[in-house]
Amino acid sequence: MNIKFFKDKVIIVTGASSGIGLATARLFASHGAKVVMAARSVDKLEQIKNEMPEPAKVLCVKTDVAKEEDCKNLIEETVKTFGRIDILINNAGISMRAMFIDLDLDVIKRLMDTNFWGTIYCTKFALPYLLESKGSVVGVISTAGYLGLPGRTGYSASKFAIRGFMNTLRVEHRYDGLHVMVFAPGFTASNIRTKALLADGSPQGVTPRNEDKMMTAERVAQRMAYGLRFRKNEMLLTPVGKITKFFTYALPRFSEWCEYKLMAKEPESPIKKR
């Protein structure tokens, strides 16, 4: 892939302080892009900025994507600093782990506010600039955006919603030069599971899975760059993710049986004894 493609492009990455967002921001910075890093932890972002190859081409904006005004400010600061927007990567997100019957409804609200509404807000305010540049907008989902994962009702609902929004946005602007990509990494080694919300809204604190065997955030970032370079409509990573999607549509009952068995095997699974 020709890395010069990203040179001097203005790229916004939400959730850029850790995991996939951080790896993506670093990769694009190494390719010469002008990177806008958005997250709630602005002090952490500033520290990361100083480690970038060209700190002058990196803008850090304190952003809670669940807040409409923060998202509007993110776009305004980007345009004020760099004059344009070429790529928006809606990556910020949180997860959960609990049976719906046990779940505090505020947990689902928090999931939707961050995952879905964060994507809506940022895309809404960035869209005029993306249309002007004939740029790209990315919605980061997961395999949970193709099938309902037991114990992850709010997470799956938010990812399904993002996929539906992105696919519809693509159709609306199919003749306007806008590139819309749905990006589903699958299980990735990151801190999303340690911060996943339990039934009462408290963070899980530990991961129930072996992170060593998962795709790295850096590898995910490389696949993200590939999808953007060749303007892919959809990127579904990992063989397990692709097989899961196939069986979800081809053999839905078998797929649901497999999902239940797989998720029930997790340590401390909320559905294990049901």
Image (spheres, rainbow, N blue to C red):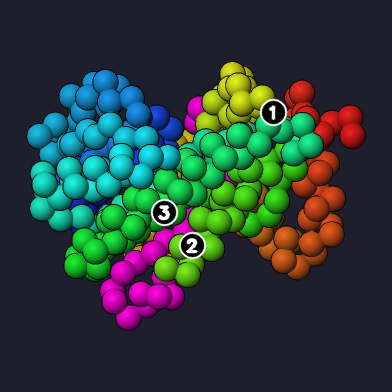
168 or 89, nearer to the observer:
168
Rendered position, 112 above or below 267: below
Residues at marks 3 and 1, CA–CA distance in whole angstroms: 26 Å
- Which quadrant is the N terminus positioned in? bottom left
Q: Which region of the structure is painted magenta?
A: 170-191
Q: Which mark is residue 165?
A: 2
Rendered position, 95 above or below 118: above
What residue did someone put label 1 on?
A: 199
Pointer 2 or 3: first along the chain:
3
Residue type pointed to by label 3 = Ile
Q: Is residue 160 left or right of residue 147?
A: left
Q: Which residue lies at the image location 66% right of the left edge and 24% below the top edge?
A: 200
Image quarter of residue 87: bottom left
Cβ atoms under marks 2 and 3 closer than 8 Å: yes
What residue did someone put label 3 on?
A: 120
Q: Position of residue 131 (x, y in %)?
A: 25, 68
